Image: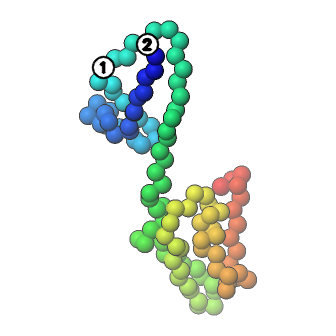
Amino acid sequence: MSLYLTLPSDNSMAYFPENKISHYITRLPSPLQLHGEWELALTQFIYPRNWYNVNEKNNLIGFDLGDNKVIGRRVPSGFYETVPDILKGIALEEFRDKITFKFNESTK
């Protein structure tokens, strides 16, 4: 015997309004009563990465280079998964002798 269930994260919002795409409970239309031994397999997992954590409204950074010189730059919009990723996005080659970015993985 086989059984296939689709459990979308937004299916039971009326019952579980706190559901999030990353943590949710789905209410089935009727209880399942499974007898004997069953194996479970996850056949599909959809992880949408359709958002930017840096966008056109929050991507301006400023640097004080001293000598009354301040520069501003925009970080390219996009999804940056780690701090080193965003540091690569804001690297300023023309000012590398004045600006250094460091990230300590253990202290974050």
Q: Amino acid at mark 2?
A: Leu
Q: Is residue 75 left or right of residue 106?
A: left
Q: Which residue is mark 2?
A: 34
* Residue at 34% from the left image edge and 40% from the top image edge: 10
| Image position of 81 with respect to 58: above or below | above
27 to 94, vertically: above or below: above
Residue 65 x/y as whole percent: 63, 84
Residue 25 in view, yes or no? no
Q: Secondary structure at mark 1?
A: loop
Residue 5 or residue 90, whichever sits in front: 5
Quadrant of the rendered image containing residue 24 = top left
Label 2 close to label 1 by CB (< 8 Å): no
Q: Is residue 26 visible?
A: yes
Residue at x-position 52% and y-position 73%? 76
At label 1, the amino acid type is Ser
| Residue at x 31%, y 33% (from the top left corner) | 12
Badge number at residue 66: none
| Residue that badge 1 annotates | 30
Q: From the viewer's perspective, tell me whether residue 28 is left or right of residue 48.
A: left
Residue 66 locus on image (x, y percent): 63, 86
Q: Secondary structure at mark 2?
A: loop
Question: Real-space Cα distance between discs 2 and 1?
Answer: 13 Å
Which residue is the extreme one toward the left? 14
| Residue under the point 26% across and 34% down | 14
Q: Position of residue 26 (x, y in %)?
A: 36, 30
Pick whichever, 48 or 16, lies toward us: 48
Foreground pick, 81 / 69:
81
- In the figure, is residue 12 to the left or right of 66? left
Q: Is residue 74 above or below residue 45?
A: below
